[in-house]
Amino acid sequence: MEIKKVAVVGAGTMGSGIAQVCAMAGYEVWVRDISEEILNKAKETIEKNLRKAVNKGKISVTKLKEIEAKLHFTTDLKEAVEDADLVIEAVPEVMDLKKQVFKEICEYNKKAILATNTSGLSITELSKATDRPDKFVGMHFFNPVPVMALVEVIKGEYTSEETVKIAVEFVKSLGKTPVVVKKDVTGFIVNRCLVPYLVLAIQDVENGVATKEEIDATMLYNYKFPMGPIELSDFVGLDILYYSTQQWDIVPKSKLLEEKFKAKELGMKTGKGFYDWRQGRPKIPK
Ligand code: 3HC
């Protein structure tokens, strides 16, 4: 099966990154979100990333123009998904919302491979909302998508081997490294380890075990992680972590995280989470 047109449904941090790497790999990409405001923000982020790449000599101006011409933005789901060969869903991490979105996608498209970028919800459960569970697969990218090489390809209970193969080849065509997750476990490989670690660190801040700066400095400078857990929580989005505490059985709950979520202090994307991001990455003292 040849993939030409890709639809990305949901244009937040992950959706816009996915759309960018698909267009850079030469696919015709349709990006859909419910508001023009979100679409404009996605467009701006992609343009900014591409301009940076030009300035660093990684791509030419001609290439930038080619990539931008491959990107189409719309609020119309039908327009985005009809004729698509692959649909990648990247809407918020709420099971019922994702199911509803897939039901609608199936009304307008009868042939595409359907992929979800869920952080850890059940692929099998999501596939049941579609008319083609055999053509349904997890395709989990990491933030920032243009930088992170890894993509998890998750096999649900009904996903066919053929679909896994197509997904793996597609991920490779983006210049990324696929890892096949053979069992549909909560959080897959990475987030099964990562998300409980992040929320435990948030609990430690909440319980006064150490300050957020002390925890981050320990993991950043002494343990040599690229980011400490509290900064990384802000970076991935506190909404994503909060939803995981509500829907995943492997993640502890945190009152502090709930407060941040309710105050809409979601981390880097809103300018404030545990840290202030308005001037860029927080400076963690050594
Ligand atoms: N978008 C695009 N490019 C970005 C970027 C972004 N948001 N942030 C950084 N970059 C690029 C920079 O332009 C730079 O590119 P260059 O090499 O061409 O110059 C490169 O990444 C390195 O950036 P910096 O030099 O500014 O900064 P760092 O060296 O500190 O790297 C980082 C930044 C790559 C974000 C690094 O801190 C890191 O790896 N952090 C951890 C990220 C991580 O763990 N992500 C996974 C989270 S889990 C997840 O996403 C799953 C979800 O389901 C929860």
Image (cartoon, rainbow, N blue to C red):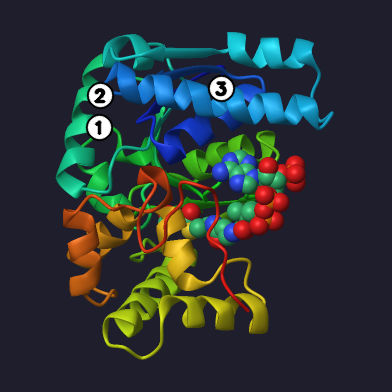
Instruction: Identify which residue is drawn at 52% across, 76% down.
Output: 216
Question: How far apart are labels 1 and 2 at the CA level?
Answer: 6 Å
Q: Nearer the viewer, residue 55 or 160?
A: 55
**Label 1 sits on what residue type?**
Phe
Judging by the rendered image, the residue that carries numbered circle 1 is 102
Where residue 212 sits in the image (x, y, percent)? Answer: 42, 76
Q: Are marks 1 and 2 in contact (CB under 8 Å)?
A: yes
In the figure, 42 relative to 119: above or below? Answer: above
Which of the 4 quarters of the picture holds residue 218?
bottom right
Q: Nearer the observer, disc 3 or disc 1?
A: 1
Answer whether residue 274 is visible to the viewer in this image: yes
Identify residue type, mark 2.
Cys
Q: Residues within 10 Å of mark 2 (few under 14, many from 20)?
A: some
Mark 2 — residue? 106
**Left-right relation of 256 to 276:** left
Q: Residue at x 18, y 73 (%)?
A: 255
Secondary structure at numbered mark 1: helix
Report, in whole angstroms, how far the alpha carbon at label 3 lies from the one at label 1.
19 Å
SS for dot 3: loop
Instruction: Determine whether, in the image, residue 268 is placed left or right of residue 284.
Output: left
Residue 71 position within the rendered picture, expressed as x and y whole percent measured from the top left: 53, 15
- Locate residue 227 relative to residue 177 in the image: left or right: left
The residue under label 3 is which amino acid type?
A: Ile
Residue labelled with disc 3: 3
